Image (cartoon, rainbow, N blue to C red):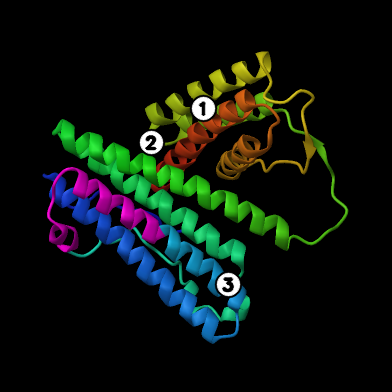
Amino acid sequence: MPRLKSEPSRPIRSMEELLAVAMAMEKDSADRYAGLAGRMRAAGRPELADVFEQLVAEETGHMDMVAAWSKQIGLRPEVLHAGPAPEGVFDDEGIGLVSPELVEAYRSLAIAVRNEERAFAFWSYVAAQNASPEIRQAAERMAREELEHAKTLRRARRKAFFAGRHAGATVREPHDLAELELEVCRKLEQCADKHQGANDYRALALEARKLSHDLASDPLQDPAPVGLPPPRSLDALCEWLVDYYIEAGETLPSQAARERAQALATIAVRRLATVRHLEEGRE
């Protein structure tokens, strides 16, 4: 699946430039989702048109956030419309060429999630490239915003998945989060031994091992909930844990448990984005 393939071509050197790029990225996404919404509505798929229009509303909200930020620091409005969006961040993955009757809400939202992941990677690159504390901190803020956007879209995607899933006989098992985090740790350690980016893989493995220890000594839920078996590949298991923590952050009975799950979700989203970036480097 195509993702951000290269670092931004040049460093961002001012807040004016940073916010102009941010606005261009959000506007580009909103315009493209609006085009897809129009296509789906014209093809008689109003339910999918609604999904894309919700994505337009999300991106419009992000644009409002950027505009408010620029106003807060005293920038002129015209600064925010200074150039095109960076290439390689938004990707509709060919959905605009697919027959509308073959498009599903889950797939549409999955594409939106991956676009937010690419935006997170873009801003992470900008932060890493920049020596200016002001620009670096602003880019880190944008990266955090993209992670939050991805979490919001993942919740919608998860609902779409369960809404569209056919009922059937399935094997169900307890979800041992400590063991699953330990499995992630082992897979990351294996990647560190085999591939480039060993230090990054090992840092993630150490983080997963700590999460496993914490969850074993203090389970998020006791008894563990029962559900469908998680996937076993590294990428899919990392994504499964993201979805699990996000759902737990909304549904656990106590506020403390929900807040803990939300913190785990943030860690898991960042981990998934990093794993996918490292996997791109092996392709």
Residue at 67% over, 43% down? 231
Q: Which mark is residue 48?
A: 3
Q: Is residue 65 magenta?
A: yes
- Disc 2 secondary structure class: loop
128 or 135: which is nearer to us?
135
Q: Which mark is residue 41?
A: none
Q: Earlier in the sequence, mark 2 or mark 3?
A: 3
Residue at 66% over, 16% down? 218
Which residue corresponds to mark 2? 196
Q: Is residue 97 left or right of residue 32?
A: right
- Residue 97 shows in the view: yes
Q: Residues within 10 Å of mark 2 (few under 14, many from 20)?
A: some
Q: Give the magenta range.
A: 59-82
Q: Is residue 53 magenta?
A: no
Q: Chief secondary structure of the magenta span? A: helix
Residue at 76% over, 23% down? 222
